[in-house]
Amino acid sequence: MARKETITIDKILDTAFAMTREEGFSNVTARKVAAKAGCSTQPIFRVYKNMEELWDAVFLKAADFFQDYYSLYPRTGKAPFTNLGMAYIAFAKKEKHLFELLFVSGSTRGKSMYELLNGPGGNVVYEVNLARAAGCKDPSALFMRMWIFIHGAACMTLTGDYDLSDVETMELLERSYEDFAGSQGA
């Protein structure tokens, strides 16, 4: 009778993903994943051709995790792009290593930052349409201005240079939207 495999592809991926969240993507090596999963490296390479394939799977799982995080984040802002900004900044604060992997590392695994942010639900498109409905003449340009501001704030959380509360962050995002939209004549 054949021995039942206890180390599954899901176990390997979940272990590598958990390691990425806790220690950072650069620490995901075959030996470290095997040690955490309680196996040799053999089961890893039985289900993945190489580490690149496992890393791709971890990246995609992280992208899905961000989309779930974003979809569940409370919507309290009234101005376009503020809820997107709040969720993005909060994700950077709470999930530093996943944020670095997805939005800072440059390792996009074939997906642009816009694709990751927009997601299958059209997160950015939704916000652009809100801005258009609010009378913005060029909502795509407004998004770019807001995005530079939002991404900068989120990156500041990685270095510990961002210490604003959620209330202060929302106020800042709303003021920025008003200023940027006003400068366009919206």
Image (spheres, rainbow, N blue to C red):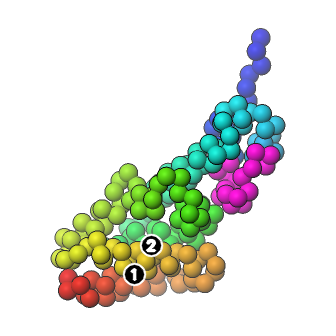
**Position of residue 44 in the picture relative to residue 31 (left or right):** left
> Which comes before the other along the chain, label 2 or label 1?
2
Residue under label 1? 173
Q: Residue 109 magenta-drawn? A: no
Image coordinates of residue 13 in percent, x first then y, are 64, 43
Give the amino acid at mark 1: Leu
**Taking 65 as reference, is 134 above or below it?**
below
Q: Which residue is drawn at 47% across and 68% down?
A: 88
Give the amino acid at mark 2: Met
Q: 174 or 9: nearer the eye?
A: 9
**Taking 166 as reference, is 119 above or below it?**
above
Type of secondary structure dominating the magenta stretch: helix
Q: Residue at x 57, y 79 (%)?
A: 156
Q: Give the range drawn in magenta.
A: 16-32
Which of the 4 image quarters holds residue 160? bottom right
Residue under label 2? 86
Image coordinates of residue 19 in percent, x first then y, are 70, 54
